[in-house]
Image: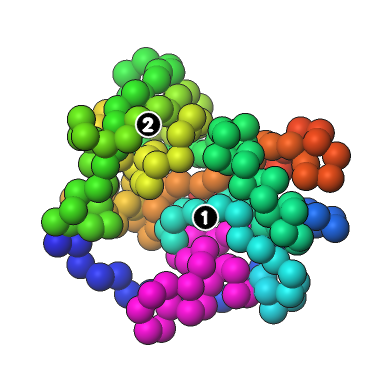
Amino acid sequence: MIPDFDYRPPDGPVEILHEDKQILVVNKPAGLLSVPGKLEGRQDCLLSRLMEIRWDALLVHRLDCDTSGVMIFARTKQAQGFLGQEFEKRRAQKTYLARVWGEMAGESGHVDLPIGADWPNRPRQMVTPEGRPAQTDWHVTQRAEGETRVRLSPHTGRSHQLRVHMLALGHPILGDPIYATGAAREFPRLMLHAETLSLHHPATGIRVQFAAPCPF
């Protein structure tokens, strides 16, 4: 069983990367829930903080609590529905930056491994033949002693997909409190950042891209 985590969200104002009449794009910090948690003391989240300054913010998608980076919110029900379809139909394209344990062989690759819940150890996920299809592209951007920096491009949106796929390759993401062990776990945060998000704008239908600088 995965031990329950001690929720201590970071302080600081919401960083808005872009806003117009239809959408809000923000840079989520690591350690902050995207939406309120079910347990007591988990009401503080990015959505609640954003609604304090932009009352019309509507949820479209989520990032794991430990992941930082680009998140988009809608400002109208119509925009929310449009953006939801962008994600559901896989028209939304995302890239992530990660620091992973060990030195990866090769410069790029493709992971095609189905992912499902590890029910006795929730919220842990795992590669399993009974899981849902999941695909991730990876590309090495930098190497250092004992670790590799990679850019990850998921083609599907399974829970913990990037974390599980990197673990399956033998290179868990540094600082991962669920999947990393030993020295790979001893980092101040999960070294995973949602770098870019590209999709069609709900008002114009034109593809737009937003980016948040990597903090590690």
Is label 2 in a helix, a strand or a loop? loop
Instruction: Report the coloring of the rendering.
Output: rainbow
Q: Position of residue 35 (x, y in %)?
A: 51, 67
100 or 50: which is nearer to us? 50
Note whether 201 is above or below 29 in the view shown: above
Residue 189, image quadrant: bottom left
Q: What is the spatial separation of the Cα atoms under label 2 and label 1, in whole angstroms?
A: 17 Å
Q: Which residue is mark 1?
A: 62
Is label 1 in a helix, a strand or a loop? loop
Q: Residue at x 39, y 53 (%)?
A: 190
Mark before the other along the chain sequence, 2 or 1: 1
Q: Which residue is mark 2?
A: 134
Q: Label 1 is placed on what type of residue? A: Arg
Note whether 118 is above or below 10 in the view shown: above
* Stretch of the chain drawn in magenta: 27-49
Q: Residue at x 67, y 50 (%)?
A: 81
